Image (tube, rainbow, N blue to C red):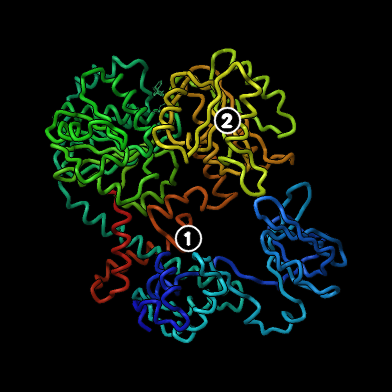
Amino acid sequence: MDLAAPIQEVKGIGPKTAAVLNKAGILTLRDLVYHLPRDYENFQQAQKISELKPGNVVVKAKVEDVELRRMRRNLILVEATLRDKSGAIKAIWFNQPYRAKQFEARKDYYFSGVMAFSYGHYQISNPSTTLAEDYDKKASTAKIQPIYPARGSVKSQDFKKFIKTIENNIALIPDMIPNFPGRADALFDVHFPETLVAAKNGRDYLATEELFSLLLAARLNREENQKLRTQAIHGDMEQLRKFIKKLPFKLTNAQRRATWEIIQDMAQEIPMNRLLQGDVGSGKTIVAALSCFVAAKAGFQAAIMAPTEVLATQHAESLSKLFDKSLNIALLTSSTKRKPELKKHIKNGEVDLVIGTHALITDDTEFQNLGLAIIDEQHRFGVMQRQKLLAKAHTMPHLLSMTATPIPRSLQLTIFGDLSVSILDELPAGRQPIMTKIVSPNSTTQMWAAIEKELAKKHQVYYICKKIDEKGASELSSVKKETQKIAHQFPQYNVAYLHGKMKPAEKDEIMTLFSRGEIDILVSTTVVEVGVNVPNATVMVITDADQYGLSQLHQLRGRVGRGSDASYCYLINSNSDAPTRRLREIERSQDGFHLAEVDLKLRGPGELYGSLQHGALDLRIATITDTKLIRKAENMVKQFRQKEYNMLEYKELSDSVRKYQRLTTLN
Ligand code: ADP
Ligand code: MG
């Protein structure tokens, strides 16, 4: 079978289906066989209802009291009671009205789904189900059924059919990596497993294969990067020292060390490729600013790219104040007025430092001699955007990326190859820990009393909600509803709201008013998460706190505690249950790296490294925390380079490596 053949060649895939799949990035047979099940339906290990624990469960039960209810906004609920000899539990299906007529009385069915506590009792939501007497008769190979991620109108069942059609061809797929046999078997076991262990081993093989491509790409990049040359930037240290002396605060040791590392890198002819990692509030901006100062005073231009207009504007304002006319600074965002004129000044070199959003990388922005490019909140940008910024220089500029998302050191080295890292592991002096408290939704009186005291001191409050407005049956708090309630509760204060669906200009206006202290309480979705700095804000309330990852909660909390006043963070549980261990952790710890590790342990890597994985690295099967598989793949790469294979003979492998080479390079 030619893996490069278009999917239309599969029987049953017509032009319409092909169009949907193509749109989802599934173009070739290879893409199709690598569209792996996200889970398996397996009714083999039924548990007693009386012994169920929250999480994935399978039960064999009879169905009683089926009830169909029409809710607002076209939501249809089917509720039923499942009963076995040991007890009973509720099952609930959303928008699957046929469930109401599916079950025959007194017959046993299997149910497989996730059990959780909500609306005051335990229930299994949207379980899949099958008639027990039919299932028990099945051959063992048919007992474990794959569940594929849907793509548009193409559902799991459709994928199952397509893969079944090419079942015989899968067995003939050649290995991709020399000396790593077993690909056909692995693919077969993932799509048609006889046991879950076989499925897992198959997946591990494919994950290793994927990691091999990624690590080989990183290695080739490293070999190539070492050959690159750029202009060395020799800073005037005396001038820098004088400037640092005039700063309104004393730099932390970590800030000094990081600045020094950057200056040394820039003085080389090999382009700098450095990541500045530091928890929220650790003061990354000033390190960036000092690096720009050095570059600009040595006759080069510098650019800082930030992910949002609010953040870019804030950087521009605070750096203009900091440099006080000693540098020419320009702000370039999509709402900048008189852009052509500004771009002329950038092109002819009159502007020393350009701060901007994506507007920086449009085709008509040209620099005279861009020597240093800085990317703030780098995980928010794709590789292409990064490369576009770097392409603005005539030779490769020095690159500094900044992030508050901790990446374990071993992974930085393996995956980004030659990336150097500076870490700000110290908060500026005088910073007080943020007092953090979990609050039950039923007892918020004390919290509001404390907030009122802060407001009376002219301090400001963030109030974070999960949703923008009331849609669907969810009970999560929404920005619009809460704004009304709070405005009613505090008529003497200014309450405003902010969310991602507002126009950039509107968002900017609200953020500007808030940073000037003209708004007292800002009700918002997580759009305030990234980098915004309002030192006078001392209270952060996060509603439905258990719905977020720890790292995200930590980032949100980091919006307060940026001044010298005591700050508070209230985490409101979405229901009145005892708070989870995760929330307890954030109540106890202010250490972003620690919290990231806990998140990793309790929730898996998806949450934490989600953007890194899907954005920058595009791993589909492996996760970058699969340390065992990474080590194995690393060894395979080493051997591969030693044997000096000719990549041209391995077309599929070299295509795959080339894709990752583009993605993993930070240059
Ligand atoms: P982040 O690392 O989250 O980007 P910022 O650079 O926005 O943090 O800094 C947070 C706040 O701390 C800013 O108000 C900044 O002026 C202040 N700050 C930075 N460094 C110091 C320092 N050494 N001493 C006191 N305040 C500092
Ligand atoms: Mg920042």
Residue at the disc numbered 1: 628
Q: Which callout, 2 or 1, points to the residue nearer the camera?
A: 2
Number of other residues with Cα within 10 Å of mark 2, as a class: few under 14, some 14 to 19, many 20 or more:
many
Task: Name the image quarter holding residue 92.
Answer: bottom right
Number of other residues with Cα within 10 Å of mark 1, as a class: few under 14, some 14 to 19, many 20 or more:
few
Amino acid type assigned to the residue bearing label 2 in the image: Tyr
The CA span between labels 2 and 1 is: 42 Å
Amino acid type assigned to the residue bearing label 1 in the image: Lys
- Could you tell me residue 630's position as x and y percent? 43, 60
- Could you tell me residue 613's position as x and y percent? 43, 54
Residue at the disc numbered 2: 463
Is 418 drawn above or below residue 15 in the view shown?
above
Q: Residue at x 39, y 38 (%)?
A: 277
Ligand 2 resides in the quarter of the picture at top left
Please indicate whether residue 109 sits to the left or right of residue 492 in the image: right
Q: Residue furthest right?
A: 85
Q: Residue furthest bottom?
A: 168
Task: Name the image quarter holding residue 650.
Answer: bottom left
- Could you tell me residue 18's position as x and y percent? 42, 73
Q: Which mark is residue 568?
A: none
Q: Residue at x 56, y 26 (%)?
A: 434
Question: Secondary structure under badge 2?
Answer: strand
Task: Name the image quarter holding residue 8.
Answer: bottom left
Quarter of the picture containing the N terminus is bottom left
Ligand 1: does it lie within 8 Å of the C-beta at label 1? no
Is 56 drawn above or below residue 401 in the view shown?
below
Q: Residue at x 74, y 80 (%)?
A: 136
Question: Secondary structure under badge 1?
Answer: helix
- Could you tell me residue 456's position as x and y percent? 59, 13
Give the mark nearest the N terminus, 2 or 1.
2
